[in-house]
Amino acid sequence: MNYRIAVRALCEFTAKVGDLDLRFTPSPTAQEGMAGHQTVVSRRGEGYIAELPLSGVYPGLQVTGRADGYDPEQQRLEEIKTHRGDISRIPTNHRQLHWAQVKIYGWLLCQQLELTELELAVIYFDVMSHAEHAFSERVQASELQAFFAQQCQQFLRWAEREQAHRHERDIYLENLQFPYPSFRHGQRQLAEAVYRSARDGHTLMVQATTGIGKTLGTLFPQLKSIPGQHLDRLFFLTAKTPGRRLALDALQSLREPAECIPLRVLEHVARDKSCEHPDKSCHGQSCPLAKGFYDRLPAARLAALAQAWLPQVHVRRIALEHQVCPYYLSQELCRWADVVVCDYNYYFDMNALLYGLTLLNEWRIAVLVDEAHNLVDRARSMYSAELQQTQLHQLSHSAPGSIRSALQRVGRHWEQLNRVQQQDYQIYPAVPDLFVAALQKAVTAITDHLSEQPDGHQRELLEFYLDAMLFCRLSEAYGPHSLFDITRQHDNALSLDTTLCLRNVVPAPFLGSRFADAHTTTLFSATLRPANYYRDLLGLPEEAQWLDVASPFAAEQLQVRIVRNLSTRYQHRDSSLAPITRIMAEQYRREPGNYLAFFSSYAYLEQVRQHFMAMHPAIPVSVQTRSMNESQRQAFLDNFTLHSEGIGFVVLGGAFGEGIDLPGKRLIGAFIATLGLPQVNEVNEEIKDRMQQMFGTDHGYDYAYLYPGMQKVIQAAGRVIRTTADRGVVYLMDDRFAQSKLKDLLPAWWHVEPYRV
């Protein structure tokens, strides 16, 4: 059986040489690239063939791809590359790669049409000026055949190794055993559902409480499905660092006791956490790990894949041994790892590395989305952009002369928007075209400047540049799924500066293709109800299945008490202080131990804390503050020991509302003095209206307020019971919790009882 590879992937493996050089960035957006290709094609003759599928075989290899364009009359094959700015700044090794691609396509075409010679051309199209620069030469078919054979021979040994690895991997996975004598309660049900979903190529949503081992319960069956479904890769996507650690721990349990197993596991982390020289630019003249990167990459890649188990620390060690950049080595290893554990954005954001590789290589992939309730807000953030006028003012005075006029032009268009602003916050029906056009020109000017002056840029310029690029890209995709709004700032009496925001509210149009292009996806969380909310907002397939896994916990483990005669509504905050304080003190005196008390805001938290400390000074208290760093958060949690006692005051939906593990006596109760509803303001009211327009009048309030709020409540309550041996109590302190609609959203295993203060 031949090893199949795309033309682009083949050339990137064999024809990349020299330095890692990111000065010629950013490349045009996907939309700009497609539009640029279409513009070039529209300028060609009537018989011109665009997107010409080609394939060919070299012993052991099948090479496939789509050539950008072919003119049969002139026998001219074109490779179209879009770019921004001065063409002379395209690095030589990039140009070599482009010529390698067109030569491979050239031989495939000569072979298919039995041509003896062919004109090859690389067309560089500037997406801003729409100018074309063509570089062409006429080449004999025999020369192209020799080049094709040379590239294939160079890759063939690697392909043979990859085929052998995949064969060994699949045999290993077919015989893989669950690492424990038995499944936990609910874990088998979860594992069977994941396996069936993978077998049938479905999307699955799973709600499963903490304690059943969701991470291992999803990874094990997904790995078992790989051989039978001929899957190429498994991506385990997490919202936070602890999720990555849990995934690696679960995968490590599958490796034991044998260390040398044919399964490549890679932990891919963010660039800012991998960079060895943050004070240097990513090119060979600045960073020693970028110089000669592609020349040293083959040896580093071989060493890494021979090791197979590749958490971040191992990737870094191998990278430094071979003097290459750890982040870009890890990025290269994403092409060859069987399992990649990483953040959501590497598959879901606009320029997602793993999604791009999936399309390029036509991989059959499985995707596991950990703590999937976080994906709605994370995706909204990925597809939103904000610009601060104050930042533009500062840059307009301090920026280099070559870009100052472009920034000032943006400023003039911005002032025109300010003049029609009638309120402090205003939503507009469309993104202003003239402003975006000016911003695009400024982006081009800054791109040119950064290319010419790669070192020593002020941070403010780079931040504005990245924000402006994202704003331009999202403006191209603007639709009902997003809002364009302007907020007037009042930092001082003279300031009338504004903030422009392209605010995504429904990520579905951006994420839908990500789910469609995966063979199977499982999204799992302890709070993934109701199914239609996630299906609508994330763009899941209509036939996506939903499963509520049986809990391992018994109702008698957790006393859930709804305080029916108490309101925590904003207008009732002052009158709620005394009853909340009384409930907390009475429970603490009945059963001293560790508790968390959750509030809707820092202001409300402080009100209750001060009242509580005044009334009960003997009860130990700790508090979450606004500016806690990671070490301070850990210190806060470290105070919750098996022998400590006290109440921690924290904010619902904050760092201590989910993702923390305080089993046994480390936490025996929670007081939740809020429904967790988002604040009623102009933005959320507009989101509610937009939800009604898109999904029906019944869903507006629920989608904008109720479901996001209750998700936080259930996550917070879930901190109390972590194992089947735990016992605890949760007070839901608001009369609205007694409403049947809200009670239906609570976990099925809870036994809820009324409580009066």
Image (tube, rainbow, N blue to C red):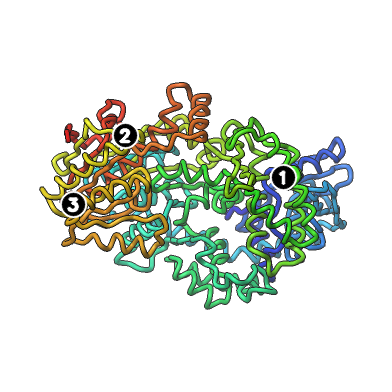
Q: Where residue 267 is drawn, which disc sits there? A: none
Q: Is residue 111 left or right of residue 569?
A: right
Residue 227, horizontal then vertical, whole percent: 42, 50
Indicate the quadrant where residue 743 lies.
top left
Q: Mark 3 = which residue?
A: 616
Q: Residues within 10 Å of mark 2 (few under 14, many from 20)?
A: few
Looking at the rendered structure, the kind of residue marked 2 is His
The residue at the far left in this view is: 590
The residue at the far top in this view is: 697
Q: CA distance from mark 3 to mark 2?
A: 22 Å
Foreground tag (1 vs 2): 2
Which residue is drawn at the image coordinates 84% and 58% (left, top)?
140
Q: Mark 2 = which residue?
A: 572
Residue 281, horizontal then vertical, whole percent: 65, 69
Mark closest to the chain's N terminus, 3 or 2: 2
The residue at the far front in this view is: 493
Foreground tag (3 vs 1): 3
Q: Mark 1 = which residue?
A: 32
